[in-house]
Amino acid sequence: MSPSASYLSTLTNNNLSESFMYGYQQNHPAHGRGINNENVPFFERSLEYGPPQEKTILEITSGYIVAIDQFMLANGQFVAALPSDGQDIDRVREAVCNFGGCCFEIENGTLYVTRDAYQKAIVASQEDVLSIDDIALKGDELFSVGKVFVDTRCVVLCDVKILFDSALLEKYAELRARGGDKPARDLLRENGCAVRYGFMPYGDEFTAYVTRDRKAAAFY
């Protein structure tokens, strides 16, 4: 077992809190297929995850990053649950959590978002790293900050301010309503989001982690 594999195995014991699960179950009506309950760690599943490395740049200016299933950005129930002005970050985080995503604090700046197929993971870091190995071997401690549930095989990482760009979300919803899933994803990418497609077709879930200095995050 590699040093990082041993290190990361200790992180998968973080259990989802009862309050989080209650919120998800009570307020998550849009997920029609349900989540995968096999309790198989995200990074141990079959390698149906695209190219070994796939990198994009994500700019954070609000101090908060969001990870959520692509469908939720077109879900009227989710949009309606967000506070109108976006200033109450606690309500924003609660809404994101209740609809299967997570929202957490991260340092402003440029994040290099790398998708590591070999570890079935996504890393977002201010340093241009290739995998969780680079974080773990540097000794940066990771802390669990939430769960992300993916039903439509695609997750979106974005600055929280994207959730309050009503014109963008309306156009995105229109494209999806017309069956234009790929053009809709391209629209998000053009507006600064990191979009990752290729998760398990029957539903997937993974945990979000952040480093102590909040300069890097990992999803696996």
Image (cartoon, rainbow, N blue to C red):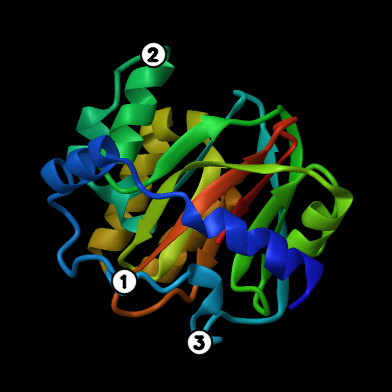
- Given this view, does label 2 or label 3 mark the residue nearer the observer? 3
Secondary structure, mark 3, is loop
Q: Earlier in the sequence, mark 2 or mark 3?
A: 3
Q: CA distance from mark 2 to mark 3?
A: 40 Å
Q: Residue at x 41, y 34 (%)?
A: 163
Q: For the C terminus, give its image quadrant.
A: bottom right
- The spot of residue 114 in percent (x, y) is 71, 61
Residue pointed to by mark 1:
203
- The spot of residue 148 in percent (x, y) is 41, 52
Three-letter residue code for mark 3: Ser
Q: Earlier in the sequence, mark 2 or mark 1?
A: 2
Q: Can you tell which mark lies on residue 88?
A: 2
Secondary structure, mark 2, is loop
- Given this view, does label 2 or label 1 mark the residue nearer the observer? 1
Residue pointed to by mark 3:
46
Q: Badges 2 and 3: C-beta atoms under 8 Å apart?
A: no
Horizontal side of 78 relative to 205 (left or right) equals left
Q: Badges 1 and 3: C-beta atoms under 8 Å apart?
A: no
- The spot of residue 155 in percent (x, y) is 46, 59
Q: Residue at x 54, y 64 (%)?
A: 196
Q: Can you tell which mark lies on residue 65?
A: none
Q: CA distance from mark 2 to mark 1?
A: 31 Å
Is the residue 143 above or below the residue 86 in the image?
A: below
